[in-house]
Amino acid sequence: MKIFNLNSANLDLPKYLQLAQLIQTAIRSGKLIAGDALPSAISLASDLHINRHTVMRSFAELIAQGWVESVQRVGYRVAEHIPLDHLSVGKTTAIYGGQIAERLAFRIVRQGSRMSKHTADSYQYNLAGGQPDLSLFPFDEFKSYMSDALSRPNVKEFGYGDTTGNRELREQVGIYLRKSRGITDREIVITNGSQEAMYIVAQLLLQQGDNVAAETMGYPPAFSAFKAAGAGIVAIEQDEFGIIPQSLEMQITKHNIRLIYLTPLHQYPTTVTLSLSRRIQIYKLASMHNIPIIEDDYDHEFHYKCQPLPPMAVEDPKQLVIYVSTLSKIMFPGARIGIMAISKNLATYVAEYRLLINHKSNVLMQNALSNWMKSGGFERHIRKVTRRNEQRRDSALAYISKQGCFECAIPDGGMALWLSIRDANVSASELALLAREQGVYIQHETDFHVDTTNTQDQHLRIGFAGMHEEKLEQALTILGDLVQRLKSHS
């Protein structure tokens, strides 16, 4: 790749000065910064079709002016202390036509979610609630399906086209949802993770002044998607059995509720399964007021006590329910496979809106996944991971019981535990902060509240699925020791 082009230089100057000027301009603009290696004299001469001695003379001129330095056995590089270093070139100012120009301070009219400097994966012990154990995924097995997708490609699929996802994958997902959940008569749309699905729904159905009804504590990224569409979040009371239908009814009469967001199987973050009677009451309210429901069924597979209740989308005569799920918890987050099972009418709008943000899905990943599902490997992997997650849940519960620092109701399924700190004087947020200082990533109650001021500050969400039992015990030991330290200081 050519970095410099003499056609853009001042042709009135000798060639060695033309090249010197081009290199100076690249440094001034920030294209080259202090310490960057320059191409060798031979390669530059070849690229620019000039004599090598011309390049050497140009380098000598730049060295004399302080722009470039020669390093023995390394070559030429941009000087560490260039003549304009005091102007902070490449940071807040730029040089254009010999003038110093302040860089534009952009007018930001909306923002996304704030990004953390340290991700959960950067901690030694990651207790994030939805983190799968990536070491359990059969990468070698899946590699053969990726290889097949490359060695026998359907070339037509590689161009722009259908935004609803790979046709074969949609068919396999439809079969899987019918067998595992009982969902039928729905259009399947494959998205770039479930977050994209919720963002699209929010953009299609919400506007400024609308409100979304959600549990008092819920999934913050979903709330962010709704707020980005201009909607407010109305907190609906919940108890140890989940969202309270009477509270929802009261808020519908008070607010302009245009969407209901639920995690009914393993409520996020408390892990409670919403009873059938409450589901029926909520559906009747939504039907009466023509309010769509997003059913976020993010970890349906991992249910241990019995067969999980079927999704609300199964008994949905008005097709109010927008069913959203993900394969990130089964495979790995980087696969970016979200699932929507929705009415044909809504599917058309979703497909058209996706054209604004994503012209095409990942053909190779989706092709490989569809063939893996067809072979039965996908469901074998689910059975293996489900057994392992149940073992880890039971191991974590046993260790927590032995510690005596926390209380925890046994969840019917999921990948996380909702712990209550026994000592009311110990702050969950303070405990989480101290834990992170010792390499344990953990989320606390306040992280999930719609109204962050309305918190007991007594609960933690412990993800047990992402690490081996021995390492999980080490993390829980650190938490227990920190509780004792905080109790002694209270």
Image: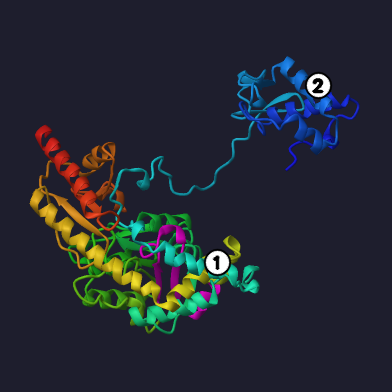
Q: Is residue 397 visible?
A: yes
Q: Amino acid at mark 1?
A: Leu
Instruction: Name which of mark 1 and mark 2 comes first in the sequence.
Output: 2
Q: Amino acid at mark 2?
A: Arg
Q: Is residue 118 located in the magenta-colored stretch of the structure? A: no
Return the residue at label 2.
57
Does residue 143 sit above or below 86 in this rendering? Answer: below
In-front residue for pair 443/292: 443
Q: Is residue 330 located in the magenta-colored stretch of the structure? A: yes
Looking at the picture, how far across and down is residue 95, in whole percent? 70, 27
Does residue 465 sit above or below 264 in this rendering? Answer: above
Q: Which residues are magenta?
A: 320-349
In-front residue for pair 47/439: 47
Q: Is residue 291 visible?
A: no
Return the residue at label 1.
364
Query: Which quadrant would the C terminus be assigned to in this image?
Result: top left
Secondary structure at badge 2 equals helix
Query: Which quadrant would the N terminus be assigned to in this image?
Result: top right
Does residue 346 sit above or below 212 in this rendering? Answer: below
Compared across the picture, whether 8 is left or right of 94 comes to right
Spot the residue most to the top: 64
Colour scheme in the image?
A: rainbow
Q: Mark 2 packing: few (<14 Cα in 10 Å), some, or many (20+)?
A: some
